[in-house]
Image (tube, grey):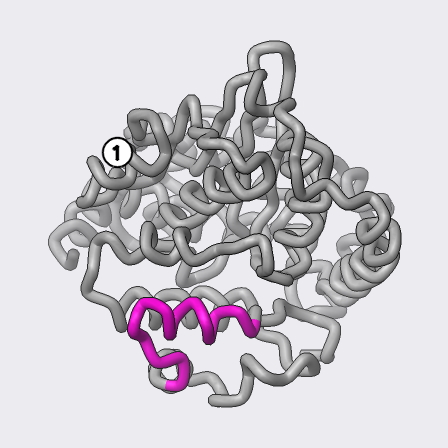
Amino acid sequence: MSPSHGYLLDPGFKGMLASVGVRHDEVLRRAGLPEDVLNRPDVRVSTEQFFTFLRAIEESVDDPLFPIRLASQVGAESFSPPVFAALCSPNLVVAMERLAKFKPLVAPVRLAVDHDDAGLRVRYDWLESSIGPPPFLIGSEALFLVKLAQLGTRHDVRASDVTLLRVPTARVAYEDFLGCRIRQADHLSVSFNAADAHRPFLTDNSTMWDIFEPQLRERLADLDGAASFQDRTRAVLLEVLPSGQVAVDVVARRLAVSSRTLQRRLQDEGTSFNAVLRETRASLSRHYLGNTQLSSSEIAYLLGFDEPNSFFRAFQHWTGTTPDSLRRSLHTAV
């Protein structure tokens, strides 16, 4: 892994973990990471290592309220690129757009931001891995967006709608913090009403933003440039799979290369477009079966199959079993 590839683990984790009674060195050992990784700006972690680190945090804390305690520790003095970019914004709409742009510097995730006269909606799509994000991370991100809105406006802003892959056991406490009922869905999304979306940020600082924006853009360009074509292809597939537009020419066009170039670059990395498509679908199918109540037919649609039988045949080829059988085994293991 080159120094510019991957994700920096925010040094702020040390303080946040200490504030809730967790030793960061023990978490790093549990995750199999060097104990100085939080102190070294030249060390980045892969998607797998990032999720392993977060799962190690989850395993170190036996407290359903931990995400709420963690979100409560986030302050305006937090200097991570996405938090800084967001808090320098004039309002929540701009803050979420900046967060979407710079969040990939510190986490394997893409944010989709939509806003209109009705309000603002932010959706998370995690980059696929064999591990995947732990439940506490997904819940923490929803809490973080509400906390960020409160920090910027110095107002008791709450979400108008929240969807999570799993409803947390401490549901009442989460809903008290978020300000709305939690709905279960196949993704994380947080919505705000129009008045709060355009409420002025008292932390708005255009002068500081003008100074630091070029550096953030440079870091983002380094990240994009260092990503392998396999990673970039997988990221595009995560966006287009539900539309069913999974042909190589569609993905190549999204990556601004020819189909031939995409195939050649993937071949140079020891894989192929069909292999990346197959691996992405297989990994996503396990995620949906293990973490949602979606039917097999609904999963087939989300994976871009024309009809359910094609998904069933492909799934048996991938796993040697049926979707329903795997779902039962996953739930039994939990």
- Picture quarter containing residue 45? bottom right
Judge by depth and name the residue closer to the eye, 30 or 241: 30
Q: Amino acid at mark 1?
A: Gln
Q: Is disc 1 placed on a helix, strand or loop?
A: loop
Residue drawn at x 20%, y 36% is: 172
Q: Residue furthest bottom?
A: 35
Q: Is residue 235 left or right of residue 13?
A: right
Q: Is residue 67 left or right of residue 226?
A: left
Q: What is the chief secondary structure element of the magenta stretch?
A: helix
Q: Give the image location of residue 37, x and y in percent.
A: 55, 83
Q: Mark 1 — residue?
A: 293
Height in image: 278 above or below 305? Answer: below
Q: Give the image location of residue 260, x and y in percent.
A: 83, 50
Q: Give the image location of residue 188, x and y in percent.
A: 43, 37
Q: Is residue 120 left or right of residue 171?
A: right
Judge by depth and name the residue closer to the eye, 252 or 107: 107
Residue drawn at x 42%, y 71% is: 53
Q: Residue furthest top?
A: 117
Give the magenta part as a residue range.
Answer: 11-25
Q: Give the image location of residue 296, x and y in percent.
A: 31, 32
Height in image: 119 above or below 221? Answer: above
Within the magenta stretch, is there residue 19?
yes
Quarter of the image containing the N terminus? bottom right
Residue drawn at x 76%, y 69% is: 268
Quarter of the image containing the C terminus? bottom left
Within the magenta stretch, is there residue 132?
no
